[in-house]
Image: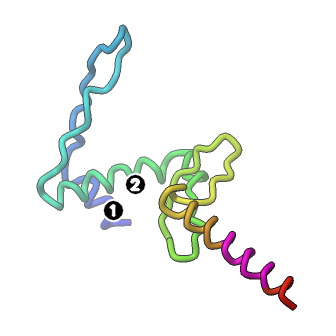
Amino acid sequence: MKLLNRSAAAAPRPALQLVITEDRLEPAGTAPLAADPNLALALIAQDAVDLLLSAEIRRVRVCGADRCALRFLDRSPARNRRWCSMSRCGNRTKVCLHQARTRQSGRITES
């Protein structure tokens, strides 16, 4: 906890700026990336503190893929997201499961 707090306090947050796009207020681009790794860590730590103190912490999940341990914030309406990313782990897992079922059904019909 001390390390997280110390890291979060190491740098101020970049100031958010606004632009008007089609009569709507929007954030102006993205915050500049920190060139110093310690400053980058400070920004990550600040986001972690915000998340840990928010109600959304209950929506943090661990990816369901066997070879992945990434965490993600499940904002799906049904709160039933299983993978960190469909393109990264979800599709691979579904392909592997389908191939295993196909091999299994092939063994049963050959007998």
Q: In the orientation shown, which residue stands out farthest toward the top?
A: 23
* Left or right placement of residue 103 versus residue 34 in this view: right
Location of residue 22 in the rendering, given as x and y in whole percent from the top left corner: 35, 10
Relative to 101, 4 lies left or right: left
Would you call the spot at circle 1 few (<14 residues within 10 Å), some (14-19), or many (20 or more)? some
Inspect the image, locate mark 1, and give the three-letter code of the amino acid beneath it. Leu
Residue 14 sits in which quadrant?
top left
Identify the residue at horizontal 32%, vertical 56% (top origin). 45
Give the mark nearer the N terminus: 2 vs 1.
1
In the foreground, 85 or 34? 85
Whether label 2 touches label 1, CB < 8 Å: yes
Which residue is identified by label 2?
48
Q: Is residue 3 above or below residue 29?
A: below
Residue 25 drawn above or below residue 39: above
Q: Tell me residue 56's x, y (percent).
A: 55, 46
Residue drawn 26% across the image and 36% down it:
30
- Prevalent SS, magenta region: helix
Q: Is residue 83 above or below residue 75?
A: below
Quarter in which the N terminus is drawn: bottom left
Q: Residue at x 25, y 55 (%)?
A: 42
Q: Please say if 62 is above or below 29.
A: below
Relative side of 2 to 41, left or right:
right
Q: Which residues are magenta?
A: 97-106
- Colouring used for the render: rainbow
The image shows residue 35 at horizontal and vertical percentages of 12, 53
- Quarter-of-image position of residue 60: bottom right
Which is more toward the observer, 17 or 91?
91
